[in-house]
Image (cartoon, helix red, strand yellow):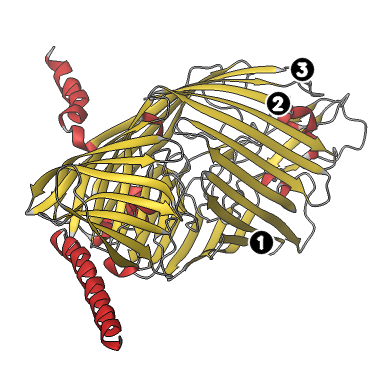
Amino acid sequence: MNKLITLLLVTTALHAQDVRGIIEEVQRRSHTDSQRYEGTLQVIDNKERVTTKRWTYQRIGSFGESKAVLKFIEPAEVKGIALLIFNQKDRSSDQWMWTPSLQRDRRIAMQDRSTRFFGTDFSFEDLEERDVDQFDYKLLGEEPLNGQACWKIESRPRKTKSSQYTHSHVWVRKDIYAFVQIEGFKNQTLVRRIQYSNFEKIKNIWTAKKFEVLDAARKSRTVMQLEKLEYNIPTKQEDFTLQSLRRSE
Amino acid sequence: MKSCLPFALFLCGPLLTAQTFSQRGYLELRTSLYPQTAPNDSGQIIGEAQLRWDVSWQPKPSLKFYGSLDARTDTHQQVQREASFDWQDRTTRRPAFSLRRASIQWHRGGLTLEAGKQFIRWGKADILNPTDRFAPRDYLNVIDNDFLAVIAARSTYERKNDTVDLVYAPRFTPSRTPLLNQRWSALPVSPIPIIDRGGPIPGRGQFGARWNHIGKGYEVSAVFYDGIHHLPNFTTPLYFTVPTRIDLFRQYPTLRLYGADAAIPLRWFTLKGEAASFNNNYVIYVAQLERLVGEWTFVGGYAGEALIEKTNRLDFAPDRGFAKSFLGRAAYTIDSRRNLALEAAIRQNGKGTWLRTEYSQQLGQHWRTTASFTIIQGDMQDFLGQYKRNTHGLLAIRYSF
């Protein structure tokens, strides 16, 4: 009996290690020092009305220690609004918003990051970089998705990381070690589903160029297409500061 | 024909370098409806039209030019009728055509320099910013005002988590105060006409410095300002007999200010605070809590004033007017097109209340309509209460491009 328990404990520990290894491999393969893209977002509400937004995104650093600037370029009424994100390894990110009409940066209260980002179906939390160390993992099994063999993994945020999701289910494609779907839950209720598609190899990194986010409660979705995507571009720290927000107008 | 070529090239320049040329703007039509007349203003419907065009051009990564133009008209003589162009924005009425911004910005490493007509905004609180000294406003409508740019040179040096801002403004830009013959001056009924005689605009420059530090889990700033208060004191001559008219003269007092602000994200709220001492006469402070909950944003706080020395009662001081008040704002994002907001200021002695609800809806990619209703109640002796006849509704439609 003792042997069986020992065997079970060892197997579970190895299993957890393996799962963590999968996520670490996803992170390792997608590691870049910087990134830039233009995103076109179509927000489709539950009555199928479509609103289009466009933003540019630029990041320096990776996974938990990155800084990013997101700037709206369309529609005209939000053009110039920019968000500066300092991702932190051990806590919620610090975020500031630059609003051209106010000519001022504002620190955003980030206690509840479930708030939708500018009327899209992304929450503020969904826009943050996630580090492997911020979550605990459990392998739920193997489940194909869109005809591709995938691992289905459960991730739970560690206490230091406040999250709107009590847990998430993550599908990782076995052949390319890339996320293809994430479902975020609050207890047993699905809150948000993010699907990744149109994979392309850019600078040796398998990259999804299309994201589809479903807000399960509102039944609205946002489709984001990435264009002009570049990795490891020459980027300076000075472009990720509060002053850079002012200059980005 | 040849002489037109350089001009054509100049026009084409921004198009040729489309990546570095950016523009945005809007055309807005607004109608305000006041159920009550005011003692000095019988107008109950005010129509306004505004065209704004903002451009920026970046010929080099380190160099950027900014420009912004405003064109306005209205039905209530708040905008000058002469079709002249004003680059200073220092007139008592709004100019029909004005240069809102014209500045050149250069940066290298952590250093950013900007010179020209520009907006300089300081502070961390949202409802009232006592440290925001280079930010005069257009107070023709006291509770719905816009910022005016200042002519200044600004240098900002940023190193790791610290930023030092130095500003010198050689020309003074005052705030625009309510017109005496209109409802926002809130003058009592007087058989003797009151005439705004203006006053000299001070010639001295203004200097300001600000240090900002972003720490782990907090952000803090210290501010120093030495210059002129952008809000005037009004004075009247001594009349030894019953006058046939009362002349009001404006005087812009010198101001030395020390201030500080801070933002601290806590577990349940983000705490933001701001305080400033004005000439060691009085201190204005703001403490607010902010939280996002789902699609709601809540901001609530208190603005206080500690009087060290009694000052002139003829001051026009909206910043002090909003002090000793509980302030709050709740905003709700209904969906990707619609927003709802509720704002309130309630004086702690209960003698003045201001409440505004606003509903806004996007129509297609370019249009937005806004409807709001503002209720003002209170005593005539109170800064907010004196505007109680200015309860009003507003309808606006904006085309953004």
Residue shown at the point (59%, 61%) measured from the top left = B273
Q: Position of residue B206 (x, y in %)?
A: 51, 54
Q: Which amino acid does label 2 sit on?
A: His
Q: Which of marks 3 and 1 is nearer the N terminus?
A: 3
From the viewer's perspective, is the residue at label 3 or at label 1 nearer? 3
Check disc 1 and report the residue beneath it.
B279
* Front in this rendered view, residue B201 or B132: B132
- Residue furthest top in the image: B1
Label 3 resides on the chain identified as B
- Crowd around label 3: few <14 · some 14–19 · many ≥20 (10 Å): few
Distance Cα–Cα, label 1 vs label 2: 36 Å
**CB atoms of marks 3 and 2 within 8 Å:** no
* Front in this rendered view, residue B212 or A38: A38
Q: Which amino acid does label 3 sit on?
A: Ser
The C terminus of chain B: image quadrant: top left
Check disc 3 and report the residue beneath it.
B42
Residue shown at the point (77%, 62%) measured from the top left = B309
